[in-house]
Image (spheres, grey):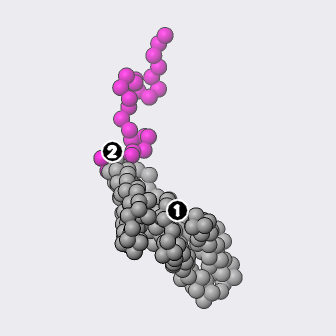
Amino acid sequence: MLLALVVACEIGFWLILGAGLVARYLLRWRRTSTVLLVSVPLVDVVLLAATIVDLRRGATADWTHGLAAAYIGFSVAYGHYLVRWADSWFLHRFADGPRPPKPPKYGTARAVHEWKIAARTALSCAIALVLLQAAIWMVGDATRTKALHWAQVRMLWIAGINALVALTYTLWPKRPVSSRPPCAGSGSRSGERRSP
């Protein structure tokens, strides 16, 4: 049941966001769009309440409770970013707005972008960790919350892997093909061919 609610919340997030953008740019209903966009976080409140009720009724925590915490953490940390991204693309497609800039591909700018993503991921994992720990304390029975401990470990792994990805872009920055040094053994001139 909780898994279905997580899926429903994800669908609800995009439906409410889409309705808010349609109201803003196609229907020109400014107040309605503001109400819809402000109500996007209510999806998280519904999921959080359902998770608490499920555990309070005596359910043994499983991976779906960990998924619910991870979803809420992701939604809080990335929610504003996703709304801004969707808003800029909707403005471009349907209201003659400027094309949104793409993330940088190379060098320091790409490394900075990756660290920003890693910071958002770390925040989402931290929120999930706090929610999971609160659930563990609320239940107060280690036999019913074993899955929540494993979910906490997974959150730490996710944050660590994302930070590692950002670190690789810092230590080995990606460069455009034209600026890469030639491979060893290649000719000194680009048009030079070896004779048979």
Q: As rendered, which of 60 and 90 lies closer to the eye? A: 60
Left or right: where does residue 6 sit relative to residue 155?
right
Classify 10 Å Cα crowding around label 1: few (below 14), some (14-19), many (20 and above): some
Q: Range of the magenta residues?
A: 170-196
Classify 10 Å Cα crowding around label 2: few (below 14), some (14-19), many (20 and above): few
Q: How far from the left and from the top, in percent, is residue 22?
A: 66, 77
Q: Secondary structure at mark 1?
A: helix
Of all residues shown, which one is farthest toward the top?
196
N-terminal of the pair, mark 2 or mark 1, is 1
User: Label 1 amino acid?
Assistant: Thr
User: Label 2 amino acid?
Assistant: Trp
Q: Which residue is tagged 1?
A: 64
Of all residues shown, which one is farthest toward the right?
27
Q: Is residue 29 above or below residue 55?
A: below
- Would you say residue 113 is visible in this rendering? no
Quarter of the image with the N terminus in it: bottom right
Q: State whether the magenta stretch is mostly helix, strand or loop.
A: loop
Q: Which residue is tagged 2?
A: 172
Q: How far from the left and from the top, in percent, is residue 135?
A: 41, 71
